[in-house]
Image (cartoon, grey):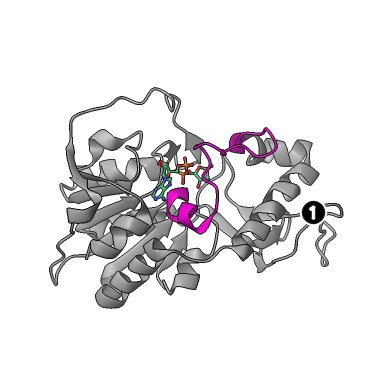
Amino acid sequence: MYALRLHRGFRAVVRQTMKRGRADNCRMELSAEDRLFVLTGAGISAESGLATFRGSGGLWNGHRVEEVATPEAWEANPELVWRFYSMRRRDAMAAQPNAGHRALAKVEERLGERFYLCTQNVDDLHERAGSQRVHHMHGRLFESRCERCAVPFVDTALYESVLPMCEKCGHAVRPHIVWFGEIPLDMDGIYAELDRATVVLVVGTSGSVYPAAGFVSIANRRRIRTMYVGPEEPLNAHAFDDIVLGTAAEVLPGLW
Ligand code: APR
């Protein structure tokens, strides 16, 4: 039930009436008891110049991300998969954190261990902005692992012709990324954090990929506050208490 999967009705977005705020007058009040759970998606890195997956420009060489981010794609064409992740490594290295990343690092400074950031992103821009309590549920772009030894290691290399092999056992080395059909990392830890959160903030994700798209429903069952920030409504917009339409870099610095 935890495996990464795309919402079947992704393109059939149902618009519903909801509380909406403008980017310039939205604030999130936090008391000394509040615990903030933040989920980010590709949208938070958009203003750093990294392409989102499902917006315009969301194709890579004519491939949808679901065609290169699967164990089947890896089996059939590892060169193609490594070219895709090498391109993403190159883009992420050239990118800088934006005001949205920095605002999250700043609120973490204030909240300390009452803050938890779960990101679907594999780039390292949250860390480079100063965030410390970051969990990369879909893996890390700058790590790889041997298919057999399975121990992740730091790897910033680009593999565009010669593919990497494990020095210990000779098996293929793959990106340390959670592909469609695989299990996101430390789901138990994420659910434990959701269980003790009092506020959930979701930023820049289309709400089309599960299990992350289901976190807001868990928050609803616990009757805790939920807010979405992004320039357009996500697929699961109906589940949020508040939707703030604006970009991460516009909205987040003024939220606290
Ligand atoms: N600020 C905030 N949000 C933005 C911005 C911005 N500047 N620009 C775009 N967005 C929003 C878009 O409106 C869209 O809803 O970011 C969202 C990006 O959606 P997707 O491309 O679907 O990315 P995401 O939801 O993170 O994808 C989830 O799918 O491909 C897999 O594993 C991959 O982690 C990824 C997962």
Q: Amino acid at mark 1?
A: Ala
| Residue position for label 1 | 172
Q: Looking at the picture, how far across and down is residue 211, in whole percent?
A: 42, 42
Asked whether, in this view, residue 76 is left or right of residue 221, the answer is: right
Q: Quadrant of residue 32?
A: bottom left
Task: Give the number of callouts.
Answer: 1
Residue drawn at the location 74% of the way across and 50% of the way down? 82
Asked whether, in this view, residue 167 is left or right of residue 100, the answer is: right
Q: Looking at the picture, how far across and down is residue 10, in whole percent?
A: 43, 28
- Does residue 247 appear in the picture of this structure? yes
Q: Name the quarter where the N terminus is drawn.
A: top left
The magenta stretch spans which residues? 41-66
Q: Looking at the picture, how far across and down is residue 113, in whole percent?
A: 30, 73
Asked whether, in this view, residue 182 is left or right of residue 77, the answer is: left
Secondary structure, magenta segment, majority class: loop
Taking the magenta stretch, the answer to whether it contains residue 8 is no
Q: Looking at the picture, how far across and down is residue 9, in whole percent?
A: 42, 24
Q: Quadrant of ligand 1?
A: top left
Residue drawn at the location 32% of the way across and 50% of the way down? 202
Q: Name the quarter where the C terminus is drawn.
A: bottom left
Q: Nearer the viewer, residue 12 or 138?
A: 12
Q: Nearer the viewer, residue 209 or 61?
A: 61
Is disc 1 placed on a helix, strand or loop?
A: loop
